[in-house]
Image (spheres, rainbow, N blue to C red):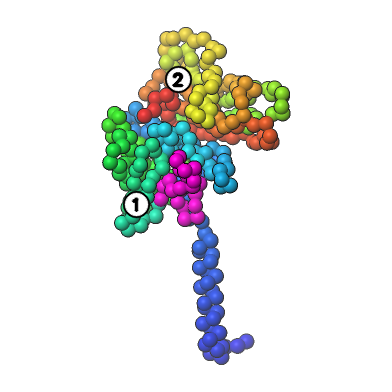
Amino acid sequence: MKSLHKIPFVRIVALLCAICAAYGQEASAAAPPAMLPLELGNQWQYETADGRYQFTIAVGIEEIHNGIPYRSVRGYGYGTKSSKVLVRQLEDGQLNTIDDATGQDTIMTMFAHVPGAAFNSRMGPCDVLGRVDANRVPWQFGSTSTAAAVRIRYESIDCPLIVKEEIYAENLGLVQRIMDTAIGRLEFRLVYARVGRLTYRNGASSVLSLNLDRSHIARAEGERQAPVRIRMQYALEPLNAQELRFRSGQHFDFFLVDSNGNEVWRYSDQEGYIQPIMTVPFHGLLEFEGYLPAHRFPDGNYMLHGWLNTDSERQPTVGIPFLISSVQPAGLSKRTPSSHGRHPKRTH
């Protein structure tokens, strides 16, 4: 075996350079942390401190525009863009969307600080400038964990509806949004998230979930398929009540919304209910079932929502992407949990 002092110095330098180059290539190949993970089914729910206002962000299916793949994301934008925006993540973590005027790929949100620089945000209906803080801010998870988060500040001269500030935590997503609205300034904080296998709850003890036997209807021309079975579960841990109160004889509802944000079907339209408040026994789990007549609707991307009519300020809601097509094979059913919410019509 050769001793180190007998190896020519030039060969040692070359070897070290090769090792450094290989390490640099491996580090550069590593994907940056996702500030808004865009996997199908990811979902985030936000509420004001008093629980009066809320909104939900949900990641839907992939769509191709100008040869570029985007994710359909509901709730991330606001104003005229609250129903759906198309979003893709770049290699450096930046989020891009499609410019309304030009139809071209453009910046939506940046997360890297550039001294003295700002970017044009495409999240809302107005021209807004965003600036990323130079230093990260602490974000508290529960009572023990703290993460360094990215804060973005926005400004506009003549826009009455604007996001003023956002905070993002790595690999979790948006955790806080402060907005100026027609009713004043509102601060929304993350109360629930499902990101891949991660479930995050901020003090919530209840979980509402939807389970479909099919989340993708693929039909042949002229074919009429059987209705889609919907099962909704409401679980509460730890159990702190032996009964639940509902605002009427209608304990729940399901409704379907198309890609333009229009409600096209509601389960309760075919039912009748008594009006007085009702109390039912509760042992930690309730289940509800219904059927969606998917054959009635044209091909497209939809969101199926479930709602629980509890006698409380925060009525639980949940949503799940649903696809109807005539060309692609059916996919597997999805299950989407959710924490506290209220009827979706009571949003800001």
Q: Quadrant of the C terminus?
A: top left
Image position, residue 108 (x, y; %): 43, 46
Magenta stretch in the rendered image: 87-110
Q: Looking at the image, which residue is at 42% across and 9% down?
A: 276
Dot 1, how many residues are within 10 Å of its Cα: few (below 14), some (14-19), or many (20+)? some
Image position, residue 205 (x, y; %): 43, 32
Relative side of 343 to 29, left or right: left
Q: Looking at the image, which residue is at 45% across and 51% down?
A: 94
Secondary structure type for disc 1: loop
Find disc 2 in the rendering and name its residue.
Answer: 309
Q: Give yes or no for residue 90 being in the magenta stretch.
A: yes
Secondary structure type for disc 2: loop
Q: Is residue 73 visible?
A: yes
Q: Is residue 151 visible?
A: no
Q: Quadrant of the N terminus?
A: bottom right
Image position, residue 242 (x, y; %): 45, 21
Image position, residue 233 (x, y; %): 53, 27
Q: Looking at the rendered structure, which numbered label has been put on residue 191? A: none
Q: Distance between the Cα atoms at labels 1 and 2?
A: 45 Å
Say which amino acid is labelled 2.
Asn
Relative side of 119 to 83, left or right: left
Q: Looking at the image, which residue is at 47% across and 50% down?
A: 34
Relative side of 329 to 87, left or right: right
- Which of marks 2 and 1 precedes in the sequence? 1
Observer-nearest residue: 341 or 62? 62
| Residue 135 sits above or below residue 98 on the image | below
Find disc 1 in the rendering and name its residue.
Answer: 118
| Residue 283 sits above or below residue 148 on the image | above
Dot 2, how many residues are within 10 Å of its Cα: few (below 14), some (14-19), or many (20+)? many
